[in-house]
Image (cartoon, rainbow, N blue to C red):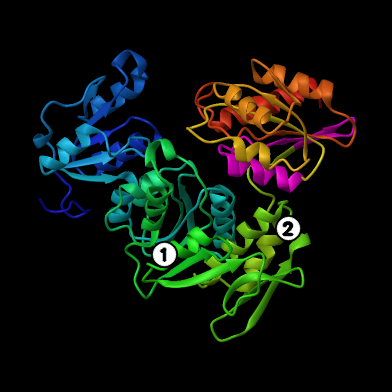
Amino acid sequence: MDNINLNNIAGKRVLIIGLGKSGIAAAQAMIKLGARVTVQDSKTEDKIDAQLLTFFRGKGVEFCLGQIPEYMNQFDMMILSPGVNPELPFVDKAAEAGVEIVGELEIAYRIARGHFVALTGTNGKTTTTTLVGEIFKKSGRKTSVVGNIGVAVISKALETDEDDWLITETSSFQLQTIKYFKPMVSAILNLTPDHLNRHHTMENYGLAKARIFENQDEQGFCIINGDDEACCKLAENSKAKVVYFSSTKELEEGAFVKDGKLVIASENGKLIELCHKNELKIIGKHNVENALAAAAMCYYSGIEPEVIAQVLRDFGGVEHRIEYCGTSKGVKYYNDSKGTNVDAALTAIRAIEKNIILIAGGDGKGQDFDPLVAGFNGSVKHMILLGRDGGKIAESAEKAGFKDYSFAEDMGKCVQKAIELAEEGDTVLLSPACASWDMYVNFEQRGDHFKEMVARFAI
């Protein structure tokens, strides 16, 4: 079967799997392009917004709710939402029937006319994507910040022309379902265990991330964390020009720290100073790395160093990622709800460094929590646990001999307990090391609830 693109999509039969944000955006784009759209979702009709169903039915969309279509050979293309595992049996069945299977990122790439700059990694994606987007906007380029950051790529793709730039945060889930996706500049920030309940092994997880540069050629650039051995190994297979960033060593070419300053060494050996690391408003060593990655991505996209430097100095960070919430009675409060895995939580702990009362727990996604407790290194005074896998974190604490922990049934009780325990000079940190799905719709809702409780009880 021919690959479907912008020119031949009209009249094609497209099955969209999942009626979340990505699926809705994909359906709207396919309707505009004249496709015959069917939407499948595991929820039954009574669990879905009636207005949404009415809207789409008015556009001629058919639905298959609470079940899988019986005959897959009636479709030309299946668009999988990122949360849908491509290993599910019905996906194999569709492939056997000759259906082209792609994700929303892939189809967005095919129909967009702009340039893609894309990054992935286990941690730091949202901060770095946002920072790159701000630099591009400051440079005067027509910029959309899209992808895993919360704006479906396909929702912007149809609006683009040759002058547009799509700064795209990509997850391993999205990259699993690409075919031709080819960014001009790609980046892998880091690689640590995450989503192993879906990818099964770290090797599979890394291979999914490496797909970000799979279709790049010698004309493209691939920005890689030179301090991360796993990332460097993946980059050995890149056809694009590999450029490294490092917070620990000087490089012949790339972005690094020299005498406390963020610098870029260009291909011709010229050293370009950007700003001192102390001028960054985002705290922690990991944010120095994020800033270096963003600087390299923008420099190799052709943006002037002066613009990069100015935005690096001005950028205040993103919501839910070590977000300062205020100080009361000498106690600081930080919302790091986006710390949904062990490594992200440890990153926040290292950024704050000492006297931490940590709120953790949720959906652990099959992680091992021993490294979390082992990484405290005296920084955490007390840990308050909640959610489905709070008990698993407690087991790791017991194994490590860390006894200063307690349980709370909800976020309000967590914050109240933290206030009771906190002394002047302490920091209360929500960095759950877990996903939020056992108690909240998403990590944003969890972070907002934490901030609401802090405002109610502490600030």
Q: Residue 135 carries which label?
A: none
| Circle 2 residue | 280
- Mark identifier at residue 163: 1
Q: What stretch is highlighted in magenta?
A: 325-352
Residue 329 at what x, y percent from top left?
90, 30
Q: Can residue 12 be seen in this view?
A: no
Quarter of the image with the C terminus is top right
Q: How crowded is mark 2: few (under 14 residues within 10 Å), some or many (20 or more)?
A: many
Q: Please tell me which residue is depicted at 76% across the width and 44% down the height of the picture.
A: 352
Along the viewing direction, whichever of 197 and 154 lies nearer the viewer: 197
The picture quadrant where one finds residue 131 is bottom right
- Mark 2 vs 1, N-terminal side: 1
Q: Element type at marker 1?
A: loop
| Secondary structure state at the residue bearing disc 2 | loop
Magenta highlight on residue 340: yes
Residue shown at 78% from the left, 60% from the top? 278
Question: On the picture, is 384 further left or further right than 381?
Answer: left
Q: What residue type is labelled 2?
A: Leu
How many marks are shown on the rendered structure?
2
Q: Quadrant of residue 16?
A: top left
